[in-house]
Amino acid sequence: MPRYLHWSWLLTIPLAAACGCADNSMVLKGKVTQFEQQQATLTRQNQELVARAAKLDQDNQELGKTVAQWQQQSKVFEDQVAAMRDQLRAVNVQLAQAKSEKEDTDKKVQTLNASMQRQGGVSITPNNSFLSTLPAVNLPEVFVRRDGDVIRVELPGDRLFETGSNRLKPGASETIAAAAAEVLRTYPDQMIAVEGHTDNDPAPGGQFRGNRELSFARAMSVYDVLASRARIPDDQLIVVGHGANRPVMSNASLEGKRRNRRVELVVYPDRRPGK
């Protein structure tokens, strides 16, 4: 074994070190490039996830709007069904009332017949043929209709009376007298009932204790006009206050309430006594 290393061998040491450093630099550079690629991939995936999350959030908002619209439509349908049920109940009430009114008319005719027979007079027989002709009442918001064996002339309460009162508005007496004139022109001798009606809102406190009392007071105000201006005999008139018991429309709407606030001139098929 030689005591001293050859000088050429000593030259190989730094060369080997240099080669090792170069290899390590290439490895590190490859790893950096690999990390950069991975980072770019992760960044792209993150962007895709963010875009998907934004799309899902938009879809969720649109779905929420659709659900809200469905709920609103469902509420509208429920309200319509409730209104139709109210109208159906009102129609059933009117049918029952018409039947009751017919029975009352029959009883009244029987009573009048019995009274006339006791007095040696003639019998009063209802003549349903009178329904073939309706009074030609051409006044704003005044309705004329057949109802079983009677004819009803509706006078709108909002045009006749001050709110919550039986005090007549200016011009109301002329409206009442004009309607009565057409009724008498067609049926001069028929019995006429003056019926007061209200909606189902509570009557204002103070002057009246309830809707029935208010409706009767309004009917009496119309009666006063019929007796004083239209000169209708007292024995030809009947005054009734029904309150809110006989609506013609559902009270679920403002229009229904307005229509129900009315006074009706009801023409009966039987004639007044002595005619």
Image (cartoon, helix red, strand yellow):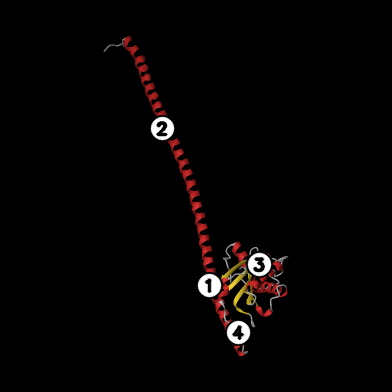
Image point (55%, 71%), residue name: 94
- Closest to the observer: 231 or 141? 231
* Residue 91 seen anywhere in this rendered image of the structure: yes
List the single residue furthest toward the left: 1
Measured along the vertical axis of the image, is residue 22 above or below residue 182?
A: above
Q: Sequence-wise, which precedes: disc 4 or disc 2?
A: 2
Q: Quadrant of the C terminus?
A: bottom right
Q: Which residue is mark 3?
A: 157
- Local crowd at mark 4 within 10 Å, few (<14), some, or many (≥20)? some
Distance of label 2 from label 3 (alpha carbons): 81 Å
Q: Amino acid at mark 1?
A: Leu
Q: Which mark's residue is nearer the viewer, 4 or 2?
A: 4
Whether the residues at callouts 4 and 3 have beta carbons within 8 Å, the answer is: no
- Local crowd at mark 1 within 10 Å, few (<14), some, or many (≥20)? some
Q: Which residue is mark 2?
A: 41
Q: Which mark is residue 241?
A: none
Q: Amino acid at mark 2?
A: Thr
Q: Sequence-wise, which precedes: disc 4 or disc 1?
A: 1
Q: Amino acid at mark 4?
A: Leu
Q: Sequence-wise, which precedes: disc 3 or disc 1?
A: 1
- Closest to the observer: 211 or 175? 175
| Apparent side of residue 73 relative to residue 144 in the rendered image (left or right) | left
Q: Which mark's residue is nearer the viewer, 2 or 3?
A: 3
Q: Which residue is mark 4?
A: 112
x and y percentages locating residue 83 in the rendered image: 53, 63
Q: Which residue is mark 1?
A: 95
Image point (56%, 75%), residue name: 129
* Residue 210 seen anywhere in this rendered image of the structure: no
Q: Amino acid at mark 3?
A: Gly
x and y percentages locating residue 138 in the rendered image: 64, 64
Measured along the vertical axis of the image, is residue 273 above or below residue 243?
A: below
Distance of label 1 from label 2 (alpha carbons): 80 Å
